[in-house]
Image: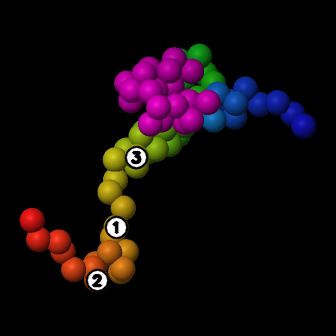
Amino acid sequence: MDFSIHDFLFTTVTGLIGHRPDYTVREMAAGWYEKGVFTADDLAAIETAIAEQYVEPEPTMAELEQPKEEE
């Protein structure tokens, strides 16, 4: 099995999403981009992953069919 520094670092950086502030993840990714380890496509994938953590999931049919509780 060949070791890939790119894959290792990409997995590490994306694993930080949701556990570290977004700006920290972006700074780390930008640093590896400047060193030539990450590509612009990698940065786009990381940015997409950061944005996706804030997307609210669509309600399921069961959730839509439940009567709303009155306050």
SS at badge 1: loop
Q: Is residue 26 left or right of residue 54?
A: right
Point out the tag, 2 or 1, that comes first from the N-terminus: 1
Q: Which residue is mark 2?
A: 65
- Quick one: 62 or 10, which is closer to the camera? 62
Give the Cα distance between marks 2 and 3. Answer: 26 Å
Magenta span covers which residues?
Answer: 12-32
SS at badge 2: helix
Q: Is residue 23 left or right of residue 41?
A: left
Give the Cα distance between marks 2 and 1. Answer: 13 Å
Residue 18 at what x, y percent from top left?
44, 36
- Quick one: 62 or 58, which is closer to the camera? 62
The amino acid beneath tag 1 is Glu
- Quick one: 64 or 31, which is closer to the camera? 64
Residue 61 at what x, y percent from top left?
35, 80
Q: Which residue is mark 1?
A: 58
Determine the residue positioned at 34% across, 67% down: 58
Residue 12 at what x, y percent from top left?
61, 30
The amino acid beneath tag 2 is Glu
Determine the residue positioned at 37% across, 74% down: 60
Query: Would residue 57 be counted in the magenta stretch?
Result: no
Q: Is residue 34 visible?
A: yes
Q: Is residue 26 visible?
A: no
Give the Cα distance between marks 1 and 3. Answer: 13 Å
The amino acid beneath tag 3 is Gln
Residue 50 at what x, y percent from top left?
42, 40
SS at badge 3: loop
Task: Note whether 21 is above or below 55 in the view shown.
Answer: above
Q: Which residue is mark 3?
A: 53
Q: Is residue 69 left or right of residue 30?
A: left
Point out the tag, 1 or 3, that comes first from the N-terminus: 3
